Amino acid sequence: MEVSVRGYSEGDIPSMTAIWNSIVDGGMAFPQEDPLTEAEAREFFGSQSHCGVAVYDGRVVGLYILHPNNVGRCGHICNASYAVEKGMTNKGIGSALVEDSLETAAGLGFRIMQFNAVVQENASAIHLYEKEGFHRLGMIPGGFRGKDGEYRTILLFYHEL
């Protein structure tokens, strides 16, 4: 099976919401603490510069959001977040999402993609980002509070577009 990535549509919102909320509920990747309702998800995904979904075997199994990392003189730097359905690892979905987001970001006029908070224990994400050409900028000890209340080190990455 091959993974394809496309812009999301209204019909994708339920799957996107479930995938996003499973990551939020895990408490080790996104800064959000509360799950999204479908109405909140519709607004949240609609407010991004772009959202892409990964389709595998005819169904949505992953997504990314893309938006500016800052404004004004730093508005050429974007940020992205990725989510893949549990149980769908090692199928090329993460790579497909990252590659599509880099291409889309460049097409939108961004010059750099920056990740602000990759939890140090998220080895699969770190491996993926480094494989896709991202560079580590540094780390912030205690920059992320996990669901368990423990503070963890976060890593910062960037990729020129």
Image: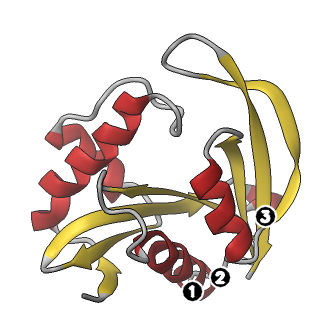
Q: Quadrant of residue 120?
A: top right
Residue 77 is situated, as x and y percent measured from the top left of the image, at: 73, 65
Mark 3 or mark 2: whose residue is earlier in sequence = 2
- Give me the C-alpha separation between circle 3 and circle 2: 16 Å
Q: Earlier in the sequence, mark 3 or mark 1?
A: 1
Instruction: Determine which quarter of the picture holds residue 141.
Output: top right
Q: Which mark is residue 154?
A: none
Q: Earlier along the polypeptide chain: callout 1 or callout 2?
A: 1
User: Which residue is disc 1 drawn over?
Assistant: 103
| 21 relative position to 145: left or right | left
Colouring method of the image: secondary structure
Residue 50 located left or right of residue 11: right
Query: Which sits in the foreground, 12 or 148?
Result: 148
The structure residue drawn at horizontal position 78% and vertical position 57%, both measured from the top left corner, is 157
Position of 76 compared to 29: left or right?
right
* Amino acid of disc 2: Gly
To which residue does mark 3 refer? 158
Q: 10 Å neighbourhood of mark 3: few (<14), some, or many (≥20)?
A: many
The amino acid on which the numbered mark 3 sits, given as a three-letter code, is: Tyr
From the viewer's perspective, is the residue at label 1 or at label 2 nearer? 1
3 or 32: nearer the eye?
A: 3
| Mark 2 residue element | loop
Q: Nearer the viewer, mark 3 or mark 2?
A: 3
Which of the image's four quarters has the N terminus?
bottom left
Residue, disc 2: 109
x and y, in percent, of residue 69 in the image: 67, 54
Callout 2 crowding tier (Cα within 10 Å): few <14, some 14–19, many ≥20? few
Percent across and percent down for residue 79 are 62, 59
Q: Secondary structure at mark 1?
A: helix
